[in-house]
Image (cartoon, grey):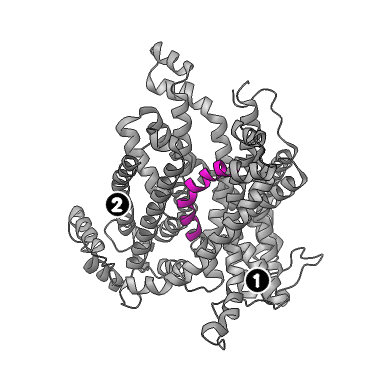
């Protein structure tokens, strides 16, 4: 097991390096930098921003030197200064982070809490009425654009029925602390729903096919023969194996959620990381763009490592295999 | 052999195929609606659906149905070509990694891993915003950011196939590497790749709509479903139809491609072994 973890950590180093290179390439694609071209991009980058870029990233130096200097600063957690308001990038990110954590944390929780039972029940009796109905609904969710779902839910629950607020994180008049909790939860309801259903559909389909396949496997039939009830055989034995692909893909759910966050936070005026990223893209605020791309990829790499190690811990075939 | 001889698409996939064909026909006829989609009638702004305007009118009094129809070819063509680019890059990288193994595999696998770590929309937004806006650039941005899944898939397929008897036989008879890859491995990897391409089209159409929705898609006068949806947010209190109908068109298109992909997957995995 230790050998597996060490091997996995070792191979994460070149991946980390690759992530840094891609982000560095993004910088050189940016208008105003030496690598960028086209009359349009020149028009967009004002002389002042171009000057700031040259200063902050030393763009007049040779490429390897620029890269080394940039990596050196990032390693000391110096993410630079935002072009938009000249505050440290890390400060702006830390401000937005709690909002995104609340949104994505809840979405991830609800997605898993609903998808796993749904997948087990549907996969436990394939082609049953429940399996077909839930399959059709999950398929529709899977193909439904989040921004469309968000607009429809806003129209129904905020404009027509007036049950929920249209957007924002809290009402202006809402009291702070526990008294305002109901108001803040009401503001979370629609964005969390929109961010949840895509992941829910994906995970539920994964669990369903895993359970449907495992239910006729020898070890599940053996469990039944030893006197386990049908429910026990499904939930204790079949589900365990069906969860392996979910754990494997867990790390990759994070970038998918962040992608969704960009759209959801824009629609619901949610001041999180997705909104910060989109605003920075539209304002050409390169230090923020680079920092957020780098951070999200590094966090995903970390989560992927944890998933791989978790899978190896529960599945001896993985840790003893040659898979690096 | 592309598909098993007696392959029957499930009924749902046949309906989906009919919808896809219908959408392409609508796209082919869409130039007839361009003029109508651009005629501004301020006296008819924000009209609800009626016989004259089946999907209502937008904030400038333009006919919404005509605008949705005009946007069809952009969506379909960008979706198809971007998915092809993504599959091409993904297959090349994945097949090279799987076939050559060793150092090539290690390097390319790291590249795939790197790409999977980024939120796709982050890279997509950066590329779409920084490159000069044009259909080719939108296609390039989508194709170049979403190939990693295809690559991982192609690598696994080729890895499985390269130790099979027919590959060994071809190698023993002295077939060259490109010949083995193109004549023996590619045709056999094709069915699962077609499935993944069909899913890829649905994804690419969504990606283009997302870019337009977020304001970094094709500039006016190009009309996009995502763009109409984006403007609908301003009229959410007054005009529900501006949000409903373009989204419905998008949903219909994406689900048709996904349903077709599901059907193709059923056919290729069930008939593949004894075909």
Q: What element carries label 2?
A: helix
Side (left or right) of A47 relative to B29: left
* Mark 2 vs 1, N-terminal side: 2
Asked which quadrant contains residue B212, the reply is: bottom right
Instruction: Answer yes or no: is residue B253 visible.
Output: no
Q: Which residue is drawn at 57% across and 42% down?
A: A242
| Residue drawn at (55%, 77%) of the image | A168
Q: Name the residue under label 1.
A: A154
Q: Residue at x 42, y 44 (%)?
A: A313
Please determine whether, in this image, residue B170 is positioned above or below residue B20.
above
Number of other residues with Cα within 10 Å of mark 2, as a class: few under 14, some 14 to 19, many 20 or more: some
Q: Give the range drawn in magenta.
A: A239-258
Quadrant where the image shows the N terminus of chain A: top left
Where residue B254 sits: x, y (%)? 63, 50
**Residue B203 percent location from the top left of the image:** 56, 49
Q: How far apart are marks 2 and 1 (CA)?
A: 41 Å
Left or right of A127 in this view: A307:
left
Q: Quadrant of residue A317?
A: top left
Query: Does the stretch in magenta take in B255?
Result: no
| Front residue (pair A254, B212) | A254
In this view, A203 is above or below B50: above
Query: Residue A242 colored magenta?
Result: yes
As drawn, which residue projects farthest toward the front? A227
Percent position of residue A289, x then y: 37, 64
Which residue is the site of mark 2? A21
Residue A300 in the image: state x and y as whole percent.
41, 54
Helix or strand or loop: what does disc 1 sit on?
Answer: helix
Label disc, if present, on residue A217 of the rendered structure:
none
């Amino acid at each position: 097991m230790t050998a597996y973890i060490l091997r996995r950590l070792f191979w994460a180093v070149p991946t980390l390096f690759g992530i840094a290179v891609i982000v560095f390439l993004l910088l050189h694609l940016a208008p105003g930098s030496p690598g960028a071209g086209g009359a349009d991009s020149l028009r967009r980058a004002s002389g002042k921003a171009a000057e700031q870029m040259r200063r902050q990233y030393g763009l007049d130096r040779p490429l390897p030197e620029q890269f080394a200097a940039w990596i050196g600063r990032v390693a000391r957690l110096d993410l630079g200064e935002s072009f938009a308001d000249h505050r440290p990038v890390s400060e702006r990110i830390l401000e937005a982070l709690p909002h995104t954590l609340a949104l994505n944390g809840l979405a991830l929780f609800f997605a898993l809490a609903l998808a796993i039972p749904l997948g087990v029940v549907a996969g436990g009796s394939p082609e049953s009425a429940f399996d077909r109905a839930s399959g059709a609904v999950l398929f529709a969710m899977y193909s439904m654009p989040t921004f469309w779902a968000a607009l429809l839910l806003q129209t129904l629950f905020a404009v027509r029925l007036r049950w929920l607020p249209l957007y924002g994180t809290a009402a202006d008049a809402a009291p702070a602390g526990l008294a305002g909790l109901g108001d803040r939860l009401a503001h979370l309801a629609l964005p969390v729903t929109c961010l949840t259903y895509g992941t829910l559909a994906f995970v539920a389909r994964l669990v369903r096919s895993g359970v449907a396949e495992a239910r006729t496997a020898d070890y599940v039939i053996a469990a039944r023969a030893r006197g386990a009830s049908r429910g026990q055989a499904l939930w204790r034995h079949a589900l365990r194996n069906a969860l392996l692909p979910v754990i494997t893909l867990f790390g990759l759910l994070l970038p998918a959620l962040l992608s969704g966050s960009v759209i959801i936070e824009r629609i619901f005026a949610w001041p999180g990381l997705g909104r910060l990223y989109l605003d920075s893209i539209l304002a050409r605020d390169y230090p923020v763009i680079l920092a957020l791309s780098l951070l999200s990829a590094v966090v995903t790499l970390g989560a992927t490592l944890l998933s791989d190690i978790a899978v190896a811990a529960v599945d001896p075939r993985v840790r003893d295999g040659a898979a690096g | 052999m592309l598909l098993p001889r007696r392959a029957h698409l499930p009924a749902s996939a046949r309906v989906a195929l009919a919808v896809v064909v219908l959408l392409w026909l609508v796209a082919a006829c869409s130039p007839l609606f361009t003029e109508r989609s651009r005629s501004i009638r301020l006296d008819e702004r924000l009209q609800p659906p009626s016989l004259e305007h089946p999907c209502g009118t937008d904030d400038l009094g333009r006919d919404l149905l005509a605008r949705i129809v005009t946007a069809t070819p952009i969506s379909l063509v960008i979706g198809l070509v971007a998915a092809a680019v993504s599959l091409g890059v993904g297959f090349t990288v994945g097949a090279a990694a799987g076939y050559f193994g060793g150092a090539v595999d290690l390097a390319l696998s790291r590249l795939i891993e790197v790409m999977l770590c980024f939120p796709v929309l982050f890279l997509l937004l950066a590329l779409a915003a920084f490159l000069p806006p044009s259909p080719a650039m939108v296609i390039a941005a989508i194709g170049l950011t979403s190939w990693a899944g295809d690559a991982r898939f192609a690598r696994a397929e080729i890895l499985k196939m390269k130790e099979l008897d027919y590959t060994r036989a071809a190698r023993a008879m002295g077939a060259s590497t490109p010949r083995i890859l193109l004549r023996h491995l590619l045709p056999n990897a094709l069915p699962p790749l077609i499935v993944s391409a069909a899913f890829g089209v649905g994804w690419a159409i969504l990606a283009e709509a997302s870019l337009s929705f977020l304001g970094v898609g094709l500039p006016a006068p190009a009309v996009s479903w995502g763009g109409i949806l984006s403007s609908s947010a301003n009229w959410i209190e007054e005009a529900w139809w501006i949000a409903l109908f373009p989204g419905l068109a998008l949903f219909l298109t994406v689900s048709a491609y996904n349903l077709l992909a599901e059907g193709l997957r059923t056919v290729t995995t069930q008939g593949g072994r004894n075909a």
